[in-house]
Image: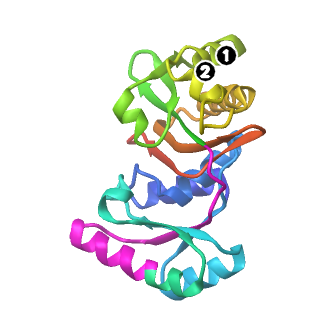
Amino acid sequence: MTVADVLQKARQDGRTLLTEVESKELLRESGIPVTDTLLARTRAEATKLAQQMGLPVVLKVVSPEVTHKSDVGGVKVGLDSLRQVRGAFDSIVSSTQEAVPSATILGVSVQKMADPGVEIIIGANKDPQFGHVIMFGLGGVLVEMLKDVSLRLVPLTPRDAREMVREIKSLPLLQGYRQFPACSLESIEEALLKLSSFLEQHEEVKELDLNPIFCYSDGLVAVDARVVLEEE
């Protein structure tokens, strides 16, 4: 599916919030590595996709009304058997229905489980006056707890990207600290610049979150993504 196809489908459905699967399809154009993620509408489809991808896999609920999937029991990780995949599909659907009865459940996303790494977040918001603003910080729940982030206006320069990475207080965690392995700071800078370029080409993007991104010594990969479009 092309970027144009993703945007056209969302517009036709009257949606501004893209699903995780659609968000990742859109972001592939930016050049930022994302995990391959496919939509399974049934338990049988989820089992088939998991078998094709290779275990272990991660399953996550896909619903326009559910933003924080973990909060509703909508995420199952480390599934290393097809029996676990089938059980996880049923559990995710029932838990989400119980937590958000009004939610439209499109299915679940199936993705190969990525190797663990240091979690970071890269996001963006579109300010009515200044345009897109890019944010960087530690990912996962830490971004909400510590609020340790850096911000810059688009377009970013290489100097902007370098400063963004190095001005957060949590920089020692990225450089290697105790149980945390060192991250490739250059890969993070490159991802920030790629996202800046992507946003310049897509003014219709209102909000964007890549959280978490797993960062390694030789690169990074985004394992979850959320994109919100501006209303027409």
Q: Nearer the viewer, residue 223 or 117?
A: 117
Taking the image as shown, residue 136 lies to the left or right of residue 155, namely left
Q: What is the spatial separation of the Cα atoms under label 2 and label 1, in whole angstroms?
A: 6 Å
Q: Residue 141 lies in magenta, yes or no?
A: no
Which of the numbered marks, if any, corresponds to residue 24? none
Looking at numbered disc 1 in the image, what kind of residue is underneath it?
Answer: Arg
Q: Amino acid at mark 2?
A: Val
Q: Position of residue 28 (x, y in %)?
A: 68, 48
Dot 2 corresponds to which residue? 165
Residues drawn in magenta:
88-117
x and y, in percent, of residue 185 in the image = 70, 26
Q: Residue at x 64, y 34 (%)?
A: 198
Circle 1 packing at 10 Å, graded few (<14), some (14-19), many (20+), is: some
Q: Looking at the image, which residue is at 63% across and 51% down?
A: 3
Quadrant, the C terminus:
top left
- Which residue is drawn at the image coordinates 55% and 57% (left, top)? 22
| Closer to the camera in the image, 133 or 85 | 85
Callout 2 environment at 10 Å: few (<14), some (14 to 19), or many (20+)? many
Say above or below: 66 vs 191: below
Find residue 73 and report its horizontal and vertical position in percent.
Answer: 34, 66
Check disc 1 and report the residue beneath it: 162
Q: Is residue 153 left or right of residue 16?
A: right
Q: Quadrant of residue 154?
A: top right
Location of the N terminus (image quadrant): bottom right
**Disc 2 to disc 1: CB gap under 8 Å:** yes
For residue 83, above or below residue 69: below
**Nearer-the-camera pick, 190 or 8:** 190
Assign a secondary structure to mark 2. helix
Label 1, secondary structure: give it: helix
Is residue 100 visible in this depiction of the protein? no
